[in-house]
Amino acid sequence: MRNLVNFIVKNIHWLLFFVLLSISVLLINQNNQFQRSKYLSAARELTGNIHSVTNELHSYLNLKTENEALTAKISKLETEVFFYQRLLDTMKDSTQTTSLVLEANSELIYRFLPAKIVNNSVSNIENYMTLNKGSDDGIQADMGVLTGRGAVAGVVVLTSPHFSEVISVLNPKFKLSCKIKKNNYIGPLVWDGKDSRYTYLTELPRHVDFAIGDTIVTSGYSAIFPAGIPVGSIVSAKKQRDDNYTSIKVKLYADLNKLNDVVIVQNSYQQEQQDLQNNTIRP
Amino acid sequence: MLRSGIGLILLFIALVFLQVSLFDKIHIFGYATPMLSIYFIIKMPGQTNQNQVLLVSAFLGLCIDIFTGILGINMLACVVTAFNRPFFLKLFAPKDTHGAYTPSFFSFGNVMFIQFAVWMTLLHHILVFAIESFSLFDPLGLFIRIVSSVTLTVLLIAACESFHFDFGK
């Protein structure tokens, strides 16, 4: 015991040294911002490095389970994407038809079926489209075809069980009874086979009053389309050779170059109307 | 004893005053700064109690620190140097005197005293500059500063020593 005390007394300068040393270190740390920040940042860098190394090791060990989890997640998400894609398609179909259904609500004889174009041409003289719905879906010849936005695109001419052939508005054989919305003057709409953006409203009386930009709509006489379906707007007038009739250049609302989704118009009473018209003995 | 005490106190005050007012302002070529305060630690008599050496050195460093405004640096360097003083004394002091000396050219011999002074100064300066920069940002600059400052300080110590002040007697 005495030896221990002796030892401590003999080496008291060590204790004193460490006390003084710690006092000076404390003073440096307390009073010198630069040294203090250096010390702190060095300490933080050290601990940060250690942490990152252990972290990396850890992540390597977990890589396999991580991969499995990721794959599971990806497949789940893909399923979800597929599900929503289908949902979106269905919704798109219904929204395309909704406005038309609402418009035609007063005349419930018309029904609307969404369809997709599987084949389309605009550059030939006689243009036809093919749709992915056929007689199995209730499609028949002489049904009208509208674009997704509700402008006239064509008329069904032929059906198979799953497909239907549509004569496009861009076909000289296609004649549709149309009228100027403003004053109800009626004439057939005919394409001249040149520009896919424009068609002509022909056989209008010379005295017809119209302005550039007036809207052309369907007349509803043919029982294919309801009355008032927009077709295009007037661009300019062109006099015909005999001068008794006026022909109007019409810009089509339907851009058939980039048409993808269409709506087929079903008229429940079409057959009845046509039968009646055909059976009437004309004087 | 009384004389030597008064002499040491005078030396202490003179060194602190010189260090603070003169030597700290000197930066030869932007590097060399003499720190003659180490002279006091060198010049303490060989018989002095190690605790006293430590306390006085700490006080010396603290005084200089207070004046230079960077607390703790000189104090730490002085304390560490004072703590290592006995080992250097053992290396360079004459063996047969049993500590009854004051380190000087006369008592040690020129070569031994200069070596003693160089080692003490080197230790002190390394500590001061290392803590001051506290990084290895510019190791070459740090090295040049230490070497040039040690050279300058040792030259000043030799100059002082050549006046033959003997505070121990």
Image (cartoon, coloured by chain):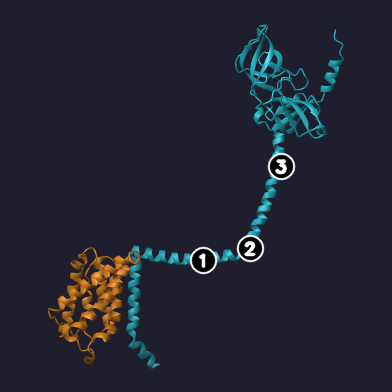
Position of A107 relative to A91 (above/below) = above
Q: Which residue is mark 1?
A: A53
Q: Are marks 2 and 1 on the same chain?
A: yes
Q: CA distance from mark 2 to mark 1?
A: 19 Å
Q: Residues within 10 Å of mark 2 (few under 14, many from 20)?
A: few
**In percent of the image, x 33 and y 88: which residue is there?**
A10
Quarter of the image containing the N terminus of chain A?
A: bottom left
Residue at 27%, 86% (x, y): give it: B90
Mark 2 near mark 3, Cβ–Cβ under 8 Å? no
Residue A54 location (% of width, % of height): 53, 67
Query: Which lettered chain is shown in orange?
Result: B
Q: Amino acid at mark 3?
A: Arg
- Residue A178 sits above or below residue B51 on the image: above
Q: Is residue A128 left or right of residue B39?
A: right
**Disc 2 residue type?**
Lys
Q: Indicate the chain on which mark 3 is placed.
A: A
Q: Residue furthest front?
A: A124
Quickly name the residue at label 3: A86
Please state the horizontal and vertical placement of residue A189, each as a whole percent of the image: 70, 17
Q: Residue at x 67, y 50 (%)?
A: A77
Query: Label for residue A64?
Result: 2
Place residue A214 in its image quadrant. top right
What's the chain of the residue with tag 2? A
The answer to whether residue B13 is visible is no
**Horizontal and vertical percent position of residue B46:** 23, 86
Which lettered chain is shown in cyan? Answer: A
- Which of disc 3 and disc 2 is earlier in sequence? 2
Q: Are marks 2 and 3 on the same chain?
A: yes
Residue at mark 1: chain: A
Q: Which mark is residue B164?
A: none
